[in-house]
Image (cartoon, rainbow, N blue to C red):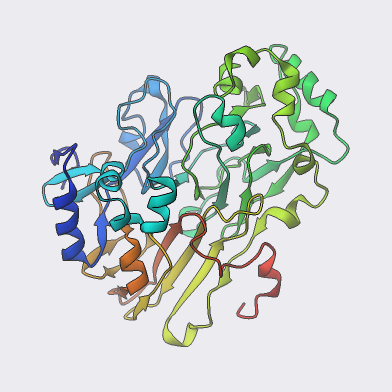
Amino acid sequence: MKTVTALKKVSRNVQSLVEGALADSGGLLRLAPCWVPRSFLQPGKRLKLHPDDLYAFGLDRGGIDERWFASTTPAANEDRTPDEGLSYCVVGKQRFTLQQAVADCGAAIIGRRMWGQYRRWPVYSKFFDNMGPIPHHMHQSAKQAKLVGQEGKPESYYFPPQHNNVGNNFPYTFFGLEPGTTKEQVRNCLANWNRGDNGILDLSKAYRLKPGTGWLVGPCLLHAPGSLCTYEPQWGSDVFGMYQNLVEGRSVPWSLLVKDVPKKYHRDLDYLVEQLDWAGNVDPKFKDHHYLEPVPVADTRKEGYVDRWIVYGKVDGQQLFTAKELTIEPGVRCTIKDNGAYGLICVQGKGKMNNLNLDCPKLIRFVEMTEDEVFCTEDAARAGVTFENTSEVEPLVVLRYFGPEVNPEAPAMGAYRKNKFA
């Protein structure tokens, strides 16, 4: 077994390593698995991580319920390791963070426009996998997060069928607040934090989650994700505020409500309520404005492959991230062109991406190197990447996500209703 820990860690001057790897692979970087624990959640056991390794960070750190993809964003965990949340590139017997590769090589990796505007890879994605629901919470807006030196966090969800053979304990997600809910009702929930269940879910509505569908959720919108394993393209931030104090009998500390709030407002209930996008939370057409189903890019079924939009739409008028799902039938080879750089994870089958192997693992040890994750540079994406399914029996399926304003041709929210290729 090839292990990530056996590789030499390089922390600076990685440009020559990156350039050599890109030349050999046609613009691709191999990435190692990036595991993230959460102390307040119970792992759902569908990340393909070996069960003996679910608490590899230590029981006090909590179970591993997330795997992050092409991430240059540190995880906002207490007592975290220095590189927690950061993806590593692997070249031969050496490894270095994607964050360092982008810092050293800039536009050669993420493209001139994105480098010029952000000076970093500003998005990431993850698998989020829990046995049960998590607290009703929100992610701060850019303006709110800036007050504590952070960035806001809109996000999106897609429920890959390959990782949802079981729904676990609660495959439903609460979104927003029921129309007619008042700010005083939410304020009372916060005031009752230490008196048992604060009842905030009484003010919300749960939607049944369906594999192969998804949601787009902007900042300041309450949501209590259910127990499906979720692919989550999102902005490169880890800010949040938990508004629910008790989940499946487990208490949520007040500190997780105010961790990304200026200290002077930590006990200001009115400020905490005003953080919420009120009109967005009580929207009577919430599902119409946030629900996603896949939309094919084109009708290529006769050619043996289909590329589908799985995340699309805008948040406050901006396209902050998008994602696609590519399915290739056995023995088929195709070349796919995209507008910008992307992170890719293989969720089914085996094959090749240019000359890099793709192989979806059955079970992964905590320190094991895999062949299921790749970062594609903008130049390679624009030139076209050749995918080949080398299996004789099953499809090759990969998910890839993109950064801001990369895909102006992506569908608008609700486009699945007019899908002529369904």
Pick out the residue farthest to the bottom.
302
The residue shown at (21%, 42%) is 96
Most foreground residue, 310 or 129: 310
Most foreground residue, 422 or 400: 400
Quadrant location, the C terminus: bottom right
Residue 135 sits in quarter: top right
Question: Does residue 33 sit above or below 390 in this rendering?
Answer: above
Question: Does residue 166 sit above or below 73 in this rendering?
Answer: below
The residue shown at (55%, 30%) is 146
Residue 403's spot in the image, x, y percent? 46, 55
Residue 57's spot in the image, x, y percent? 32, 27
Please give left or right for residue 245 compared with residue 102 in the image.
Answer: right
The residue shown at (63%, 51%) is 315
The answer to whether residue 140 is seen in the rendering is no
Residue 291's spot in the image, x, y percent? 67, 56
Please give left or right for residue 109 compared with residue 250 in the image.
Answer: left
